Image (cartoon, rainbow, N blue to C red):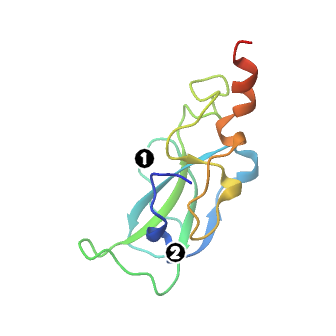
Amino acid sequence: MSSLINAEALTAEVRLRWLEDWDLLDYVRQAVTKDRRRAGQPRYGRAGRLVGWADLGEDADRDPDTGLYRRRIFYLLPHDRDQEPDGQYRVGAPGEAIDPRTLAPCAVGEKTDRSQQRALLAHAEPA
């Protein structure tokens, strides 16, 4: 489980939407963002690219301070493994990264051997 997102913040999720084939990605980064809509593609103003998001059900509550909905997004940055396979995340992954195969509505997701490239790490350790 990712320690960066609290499962209680995800209780209104009803489906996950993907812009890319998540089965081809070792990991995706996840974050909770605020948006004026419960469903549909949220605004994305960060570096990198949006690869997916969660749609919320009709019973979703708005943030009392902003009046916006808290929605989960999935994204990748230019220096992530899919773009730089021999870069800084050749082994390991960022703290907010999880294996997209472990995701479901209301489920935080998990780090796995695949997302962390633990097989490469085991082969790289000196005997």
* Residue that protrudes farthest toward the bottom in the picture: 59
| Residue that numbered label 1 is attached to | 46
Residue behind mark 2: 39
Q: Is residue 64 left or right of residue 117?
A: left
The residue lying toward the viewer, choosing from 78 and 105, is: 105
Please provide percent x and percent y for residue 91: 64, 28
**Alpha-carbon neighbours of circle 2 within 10 Å: few (<14), some, or many (≥20)?**
many
Q: Residues within 10 Å of mark 1 (few under 14, many from 20)?
A: few
Amino acid tagged 1: Arg
Picture residue at 59% right of the left edge, 66% below the top:
107
Question: Measured from the top left, where is residue 25 in percent x and y?
Answer: 70, 45
Q: Amino acid at mark 2?
A: Ala
Q: Residue furthest front?
A: 127
Do the CB atoms of the residues marked 2 and 1 lie less than 8 Å apart?
no
Q: Report whether residue 21 is seen.
A: no
- In the displayed image of the protein, which residue is found farthest to the top? 126
Q: Is residue 82 left or right of residue 123?
A: left
Which x, y percent locates residue 97?
56, 45
Q: Relative to 108, is 18 on the left or the right? A: right
